[in-house]
Amino acid sequence: MTYSLNFAAVWRSFDLLLQGLSLSLGLAVVAIVVGCMIGLITAFGLVSKSVALRKPAGFYVTAIRNTPILVLVLFSYFALPELGVRLGKIESFVLTLAIYSGAYLAEVFRGGLIAIPPGQREAGLAIGLTEMQIRTSITIPLMLRSVLPSLGSTIISLFKDTSLAAAIAVPELTFEARKINVESFRVIETWIVASCLYVATCSLLAALMRGVERRLAVPR
């Protein structure tokens, strides 16, 4: 039995794939912005001397990192309404992805925070900066520069994780590809094109992050 490749049906619906790709990028951007905020706050909690801050932060990171993201997506969309929290498909997925990424970014940022020499804080205190000013003007910028490679990898992984939104019928790239596959029966062609779009986008993101790393690299 032979299979003859025919991409005609996929090309006819290529605009749907591009729309899905655009939505995937949008989901990833919003989730990474919110996730960075969550991760940064959690990272300061993890390195805090206060047990009241360190324990809840540690529990959040452990619980989220050891739960499959698909389970979190399904829980957010199907279980939360039973508790009176009703969100749309997109809002539910973005919130889940942000919370999930925040747990991983917390560990990334924690590593960057503990790598900063204590002398940086002492220098800030010596010139009269407050603790908040030290964090915003010294600690966070230095930390971000040192964790750029890990941050870039997390961003790319987060973009790929948007494919799980298809599980709750969010019309991102994987959902649109599956719909084209069902309607055209061109299984191989559809997933080849969808895979190429993912690879091309991830490669572009990786190139952009390498450019940012070179521009902001810590001098050695």
Image (spheres, rainbow, N blue to C red):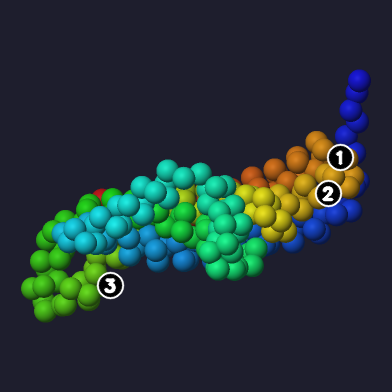
Left or right of 216 on screen, residue 124:
left
> Looking at the image, which residue is at 60% across and 59% down?
77
Measured in 3D between alpha carbons, the distance from the residue under mark 3 to the one under mark 2, in whole angstroms, is 48 Å
Q: Is mark 2 in CB contact (under 8 Å) with mark 1?
A: yes
**182 over 132 or under it: above or below:** above
Q: Badge 2: how crowded within 10 Å, few (<14), some, or many (20+)?
A: many
Residue at the limit of the structure toward the top, as seen here: 1
> Viewed as shown, does residue 121 lie left or right of 20?
left
Q: Residue at x 47, y 51 (%)?
A: 154
Q: Where residue 186 is drawn, which disc sits there?
A: 1
Amino acid tagged 3: Thr
- Identify the amino acid type marked 1: Arg
Name the residue carrying label 2. Answer: 180
Image: 62 above or below 127: above
Viewer-proximal residue, 60 or 101? 60
Tell me the distance, in whole angstroms, between the alpha carbons under discs 1 and 3: 53 Å
What is the total number of numbered labels drawn onto the structure image?
Answer: 3
Residue 17's tag is none
In percent of width and height, residue 3 lies at 89, 28
Q: Which residue is mark 3?
A: 136
Residue 55 vs residue 148, the one in the foreground: 55
Question: Is 67 situated above or below 125?
Answer: above
Q: Position of residue 157 (x, y in %)?
A: 52, 48
Please name which of the two marks, 1 or 3, marks the residue nearer to the observer: 1
Disc on the earlier residue, 1 or 3: 3
Q: Quadrant of residue 128?
A: bottom left
